[in-house]
């Protein structure tokens, strides 16, 4: 068996108590026993065969590991997998989707005095990142509706931004952005396009192929899919962007832990199976809710009534339209929505999307809580709106659960 160490330990009987306690029992993976899956490499420091090679690893001229904040094998296995799925040039995993968004902005060169043009239909914490972290650093964000291409282009031309930011499928109204058109506008203005592709995942859309410079995921969502690991990732379209991105990750230090990388890597292996089923379930739930008298509106890009139905059919792969359905309960306010939430039996009331478990979220008290009622209404997010992230349960069971909860919350509006 090959020695797992580049240099063998000194004989243990020549070592003192503490040296033996630290080194004697260690079971390092021998080079000649290959597990089928990538192990969790929890180590913080990594040895090199020689000091000269360690010097090159630190310099970045030799591929290898030295210190976990600079890169580590389990994270790199995840990064390589997602780079391949996104057809990018490289990627870096972060400790959360928010850390990844922040990393992408810095890697795109956004600095004090710069402007960002963003779509206005966004995840609430991203808006808060722009307002509470970036604005005090001298970075101005201007919002425009990315679904109105003429208005969005006017905003880009007026701002001359460093970066343009959009979500592939927005939250919670599930508007689909015409990414090829937006990326072309950004390129004409000399701006980088950063896309939060969390809701579509690489199964439905690969934004780099449509012109994006950076793709960001909250891997907490579909990529992991099991609700047990928080994480994020930034994928670069060009190898030139990878060095600044790695520098941000090394120096800001919001890196993904090895345990989370392992869980996420395991989740990614079943992404296609899970998400295909989730999208099919979501379609069935949406089609059923459209006909329910207790539901005033259903937002789902796979319904012909959705404003982006044809764009979604063109841009989203495999005939899939995403696995989130938002809907408004008829004539409902907070009291009715609270009763509806409390009446759900199968669907969890939770604040995430993408899990195998169906989860319902009430934007007014959670993702969009920081906005005033007037701001929410202006975005089309009324007090009657709920968002269902559809899981892999039986579609019939999900429909039955949602319908019984509507019946209980709004008895006069049931079928
Ligand atoms: C679209 C989108 N982007 C980013 C995030 C932030 O991800 P995380 O919670 O992993 O930081 C979320 C979280 O819900 C999200 O929905």
Image (spheres, helix red, strand yellow):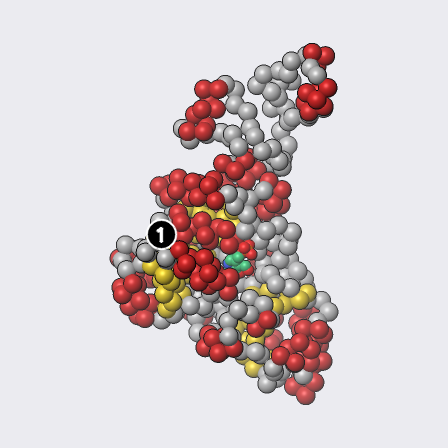
Residue that badge 1 annotates = 111
Residue 191 placement, left or right of 58: left
Q: State the image quarter where residue 160 is shown.
A: bottom left
- The answer to whether any part of residue 253 appears in the image is yes
Q: Which one is in front, 42 or 304? A: 42
Q: Which one is in front, 15 or 392? A: 15
Q: Residues within 10 Å of mark 1 (few under 14, many from 20)?
A: some
Residue at 43%, 25% in the rendered image = 56
Q: Which quadrant would the N terminus be assigned to in this image?
A: top right
Q: Position of residue 272 (x, y in %)?
A: 56, 52
Residue 68 placement, left or right of 10: left
Q: State the image quarter where residue 324 is shown.
A: bottom right
Q: How many marks?
A: 1
Q: Position of residue 336 (x, y in %)?
A: 65, 81
Q: Is residue 91 above or below residue 44?
A: below
Residue at 32%, 56% in the rendered image = 113
Q: Is residue 386 above or below residue 262?
A: below
Asked if ligand 1 lies within 8 A of label 1, the reply is: no
Residue at 35%, 49% in the rendered image = 109
Q: Which quadrant would the C terminus be assigned to in this image?
A: bottom right
Residue at 68%, 88% in the rendered image = 412
Q: Is residue 310 above or below residue 108?
A: below
Q: Position of residue 286 (x, y in %)?
A: 57, 72
As drawn, the residue found furthest toward the front would be 136
- The answer to whether any part of residue 291 appears in the image is no
User: SS at mark 1?
Assistant: loop
Q: Position of residue 408 (x, y in %)?
A: 72, 80
Q: Which one is in front, 389 or 24? A: 24
As drawn, the residue found furthest toward the bottom would be 412
């Amino acid at each position: 068996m090959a020695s797992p160490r580049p240099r063998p330990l000194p004989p243990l009987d020549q070592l003192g108590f503490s040296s033996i306690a630290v080194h004697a029992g260690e079971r390092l993976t021998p080079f000649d026993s290959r597990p089928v899956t990538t192990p969790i490499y929890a180590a913080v420091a990594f040895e090199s065969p020689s000091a000269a090679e360690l010097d090159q690893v630190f310099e970045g001229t030799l591929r290898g590991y030295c210190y976990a904040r600079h890169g580590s094998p389990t994270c790199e296995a995840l990064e390589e997998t997602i780079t391949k799925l996104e057809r990018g040039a490289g990627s870096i995993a972060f400790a959360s989707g928010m850390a990844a968004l922040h990393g992408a902005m810095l890697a795109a060169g956004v600095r004090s005095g710069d402007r960002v043009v963003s779509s206005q239909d966004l995840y609430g914490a991203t808006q808060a990142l722009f307002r509470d972290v970036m604005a005090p650093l001298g970075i101005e964000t201007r919002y425009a509706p990315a679904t109105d291409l003429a208005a969005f282009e006017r905003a880009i031309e007026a701002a001359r931004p460093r970066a343009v930011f959009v979500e592939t499928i927005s939250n919670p109204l599930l508007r689909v952005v015409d990414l090829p058109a937006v990326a072309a506008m950004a390129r004409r203005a000399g701006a980088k396009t950063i896309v939060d592709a969390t809701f579509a995942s690489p199964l439905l859309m690969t934004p780099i192929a449509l012109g994006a410079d950076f793709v960001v995921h909250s891997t907490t969502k579909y990529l992991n899919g099991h609700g047990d690991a928080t994480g994020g990732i930034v994928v670069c379209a060009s190898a030139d962007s990878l060095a600044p991105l790695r520098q941000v990750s090394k120096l800001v230090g919001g890196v993904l832990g090895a345990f989370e990388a392992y869980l996420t890597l395991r989740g990614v292996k079943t992404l296609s199976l899970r998400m295909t089923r989730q999208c099919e379930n979501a379609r069935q739930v949406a089609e059923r809710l459209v006909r329910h008298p207790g539901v005033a509106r259903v937002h789902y890009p796979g319904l012909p009534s959705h404003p982006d139905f044809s764009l979604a059919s063109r841009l989203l792969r495999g005939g899939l339209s995403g696995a989130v359905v938002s809907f408004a309960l008829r004539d409902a306010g907070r009291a009715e929505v609270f009763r509806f939430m409390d009446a759900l039996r199968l669907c969890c009331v939770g604040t995430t999307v993408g899990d195998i478990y169906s989860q319902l979220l009430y934007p007014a008290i959670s993702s969009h809580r920081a906005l005033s009622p007037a701001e929410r209404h202006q975005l089309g997010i009324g007090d009657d709106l709920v968002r269902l992230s559809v899981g892999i349960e039986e579609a019939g069971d999900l429909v039955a659960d949602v319908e019984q909860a509507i019946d209980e919350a709004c008895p006069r509006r049931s079928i």
